[in-house]
Image: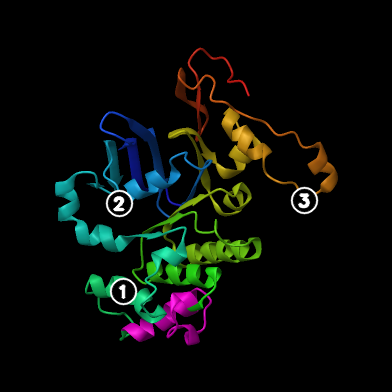
């Protein structure tokens, strides 16, 4: 992992209006950096703001406040985005949670994989679009016989592999995977996560991995950020976060990880965090590279 910062998120906030007067703050003053070649994990319960952050990073949503710097380009600035549009659309790719709805059901797999190249008018490196599709299929572990099939003829794991192949055909520098294993069964989840690790080592892209499964995140990611009610409450190297969690919400999440040993599982004590003390918390460096939202008065948050 390089020390070069590829993505710099500064005080990002996003809100959605339920009515003209009522609005919900989905992301609240979130800041973090992702280094080149890093696998960065983002975890939290449903509704914590993880997917909203991802969609802001990919310009699907326009943030209400804050800046997002990709290299030296502020992608929140519409003028700068238009100026660098082709670079941003080719070097950044996203894999969505629901592969069934993210793939066009009326297109063949071969056309789905190479569609981004056609849109950007990119000449296939391997001479033809069909050869490019076949190569990418091989990279994600699917046979060429799948090229003429439609998404409805594939299993959930196979569809997700097609979505991965589609993102890889652009040779991205930055890849966002928004809960790509949430809808898959456990055995397929492990296959997809191992595929991600293999592809990242082979291609060297920077990777933002969003998930609920904390065990998978620990296995895959270099650093992990924890989100709670739109705020980033803890950020640390993966090994340190799992061995020395500081914020009570992180401890709550870790306490919910199932234990394979039935004896230890029966003795496991689940913790619960109700958000107490969040209002007066400040972003604090606990140790080098380990940050957490802690009370300004120095008292510990209660669980």
**Which is the main secondary structure of the residues drawn in magenta?**
helix
Q: Position of residue 211 (x, y in %)?
A: 53, 50
Vertical position of residue 95 compared to residue 170: above or below: above
Provide the residue designation for mark 2.
60
Vertical position of residue 35 compared to residue 231: above or below: below
Tell me the quadrant of the picture where the C terminus can be found. top right
Q: Position of residue 156 (x, y in %)?
A: 53, 68
Determine whether, in the image, residue 220 is placed left or right of residue 79. Answer: right
Provide the residue designation for mark 1.
115
Name the residue: 14% across, 48% down. 79
Provide the residue designation for mark 3.
260
The answer to which of 203 and 115 lies nearer the viewer is 115
The answer to which of 244 and 259 lies nearer the viewer is 259
Query: Of the residues tagged 2 and 3, which is closer to the observer?
Result: 2
Name the residue: 63% across, 40% down. 242
Which SS class for mark 2? loop
| C-alpha separation, residue under disc 2 versus residue under disc 1 | 19 Å
* Count of numbered marks: 3
Determine whether, in the image, residue 187 is placed left or right of residue 114. Answer: right
Name the residue: 24% across, 71% down. 119
Name the residue: 40% across, 39% down. 32
Q: Which residues are magenta?
A: 129-152
């Amino acid at each position: 992992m390089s020390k070069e910062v590829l993505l710099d998120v500064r005080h990002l906030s996003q809100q959605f209006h339920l009515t003209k007067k009522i609005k919900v703050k989905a992301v609240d003053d979130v800041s973090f950096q992702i280094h080149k070649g890093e696998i960065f994990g983002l975890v939290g319960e449903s509704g914590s703001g993880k997917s909203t952050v991802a969609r802001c990073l990919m310009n699907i949503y326009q943030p209400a406040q804050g800046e997002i710097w990709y290299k030296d380009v502020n992608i929140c600035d519409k003028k700068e985005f238009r100026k660098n549009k082709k670079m941003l659309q080719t070097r950044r790719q996203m894999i969505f949670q629901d592969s069934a709805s993210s793939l066009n059901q009326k297109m063949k797999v071969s056309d789905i994989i190479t569609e981004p190249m056609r849109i950007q008018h990119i000449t296939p490196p391997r001479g033809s679009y069909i050869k490019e599709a076949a190569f990418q299929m091989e990279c994600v572990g699917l046979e060429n016989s799948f090229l003429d099939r439609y998404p409805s003829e594939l299993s959930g794991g196979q569809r997700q592999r097609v979505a991965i192949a589609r993102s890889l055909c652009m040779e991205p520098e930055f890849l966002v995977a928004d809960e790509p294993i949430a809808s898959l069964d456990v055995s397929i989840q492990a296959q997809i996560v191992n595929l991600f690790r293999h592809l990242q080592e082979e291609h060297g892209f920077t990777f933002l991995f969003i998930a609920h499964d904390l065990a998978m995140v620990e296995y895959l990611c270099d650093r992990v950020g924890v989100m709670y009610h739109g705020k980033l409450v803890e950020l640390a190297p993966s090994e340190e976060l799992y061995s020395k969690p500081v914020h009570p919400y992180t401890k709550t999440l870790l306490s919910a990880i199932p234990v394979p040993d039935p004896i230890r599982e029966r003795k496991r004590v689940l913790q619960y965090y109700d958000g107490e003390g969040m209002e007066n918390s400040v972003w604090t460096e606990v140790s080098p590279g380990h940050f957490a939202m802690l009370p300004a008065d120095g008292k510990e948050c209660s669980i």
